[in-house]
Amino acid sequence: MNIKDLKEKIKGLKKEISRLQDENNSLWFMLDEFDKSNIHNPEYNKIFEEAFKKLREQSKMIHSKVEEA
């Protein structure tokens, strides 16, 4: 290989490194978002429990059988 070929190879490798670093950052961001959305996380568990409790109460108010008036 000559110097020109090596410089082209280095240029290509730098682009690949940049792409992989970007992908790595995106994956870490996705993992952070996944952790934040985990309903077993104690910080969010209370919020979800309250929301589900309200939904259960509201569903009890809806009459599901069709009957004659």
Image (tube, rainbow, N blue to C red):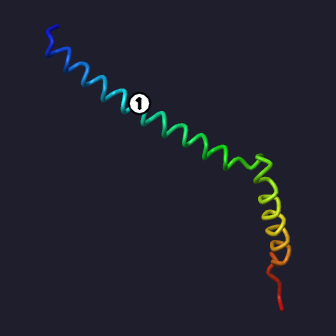
At 78% from the left and 64% from the top, the residue drawn is: 51
Q: Nearer the viewer, residue 25 or 56?
A: 25
- The reply, left or right, for residue 55 in relation to residue 17 is right
At 23% from the left and 18% from the top, the residue drawn is: 9
Quadrant location of the C terminus in the rendered image: bottom right
At 61% from the left and 43% from the top, the residue drawn is: 32
- The reply, left or right, for residue 47 in relation to residue 22 is right
Q: Is residue 24 shown above or below 58?
A: above
Q: Is residue 63 shown above or below 26?
A: below
Residue 33 picture location, percent across and down: 60, 47
Residue 65 picture location, percent across and down: 82, 77
Q: Residue furthest top?
A: 1
Residue 64 picture location, percent across and down: 80, 75
At 26% from the left and 20% from the top, the residue drawn is: 10
Query: Residue 57's image quarter?
Result: bottom right
> Which residue type carries mark 1?
Leu
How busy is the neighbourhood of tag 1: few (under 14 within 10 Å), some, or many (20 plus)?
few
As helix, strand or loop, the secondary structure at mark 1 comes to helix
Q: Exactly how many numbered labels are in the figure? A: 1
Q: Nearer the viewer, residue 31 or 11?
A: 11
Q: Which residue is tagged 1? A: 20
Q: Is residue 36 shown above or below 58?
A: above
